[in-house]
Amino acid sequence: MFVYRFSLFLAASSMLTPVFAMDDIFPPQAADGWGTYARINLWEASDFLPTRKIEGDWNQDFSPKAGQNTSLRSYRAELGLTYKEWQLNMEARQEGVLQATASTLAFVKAYKQGEGGRPQEPVSYQLNAQMKSWSGFGLRIGRWFATGDAFQPRFFASAVYYTQPQYRSAQATGNASYSDNQHYSFSASEIDTNSRYQYLFRQFEPEARGYSSSIAMDWKINANWRMQYKMDDVFNHFQWQHLPELQQSLNSAVVQYDSHGYLNYQPLLQGANRQADQSISVPMTHAAQLSYQWQQWELNTQIRRFYGEFLPSLGVAKYTSYGRFDVNFDTRYKSLGLGWSNASFGMQLQSDNVNLGRAKVLGLGLHFNKQF
């Protein structure tokens, strides 16, 4: 029962569901008159397995690193209007993180493989995994602020209001052991908060609202050097009413002794469902880039901090009559990105494997803008 639920827990994290080029992260630049734009950025990365394989076969491409393993996901789509310094857009976001120890993942793999994957010698596993994710749809308004001439910093501030956001937070801890290849035991607990969770006799429908804000800076230091910096979700607050929560403990030992030495028969599964009001803040995301341009060439270095993970990358770009071509390398997940853009269109692909079905990192960025 525990492993079954834990496998579902891992599978749910895959359904939350380059590092991005800075042009895809940064807000559209201010221009005279009206303009329209659209952007889609989809990105996911995992330490131990391609996320689309979590529900399937773990015999291939399973290679967790020692200690903590992290899977990240960020999906974002925007459709907006610009007028001089102002920006108005509708956006949809979905992002989250899954963290699990190598010992936890090894136990789940052994169980999923059935009899052939069970250890031949006694072995114990310490279990620890947690996942957080959220999604929302909202309306954002923002404005650029200039501080001087072309070589002075410019700043962008925006705020968004989300209607009916969704939230998921789960944590599982415990231990498990195989005494031989036929018998195992476990003791574990789980807390699962899920705005989409359905159960019998639920009294209320969950209600939610939230807001968030972002700040960005664009500083063309001189003719060659440029620095950009952005903070997403600087001030944010989400309020849920009647948010469903499941708390449960599982133990394979059904007979225990109480403090007086009497036999105490416990069920295999104990738990409770409840609904509660919760206030939640999502982690702030930082992104910074420093670039140097010389004639048709540009060198850049970027670092992001997303859900506690630092994501550095190095890039090179060349401007041609056919548009800008760029290449970047993500040093955290060891993935390569290729991109092309012109005045109106742009696209970027990111992966750590030419076989996308076996890739632990996948990124796709598309953008369009038109000035009237």
Image (tube, helix red, strand yellow):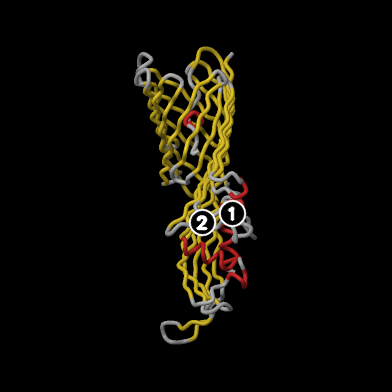
On screen, residue 301 versus residue 180, left or right, reads left
Q: In which quarter of the image is the N terminus?
A: bottom right
Q: In this view, does 294 lie above or below 100?
A: above
State which quadrant residue 284 falls in.
Answer: top left
Please name the residue shown 53% across and 65% down the image: 248
Q: Is residue 262 above or below residue 23?
A: below
On screen, residue 181 versus residue 66, left or right, reads right
Local secondary structure at mark 1: helix
Q: Mark 2 points at which residue?
A: 170
On screen, residue 174 versus residue 220, left or right, reads right
Residue 12, numbered label:
1
Local secondary structure at mark 2: strand
The three-letter amino acid code for the residue at tag 1 is Ala
Q: Where is residue 189 in the image (x, y as percent from the top left)?
A: 49, 66
Total numbered circles: 2
Q: In this view, does 267 lie above or below 237?
A: below
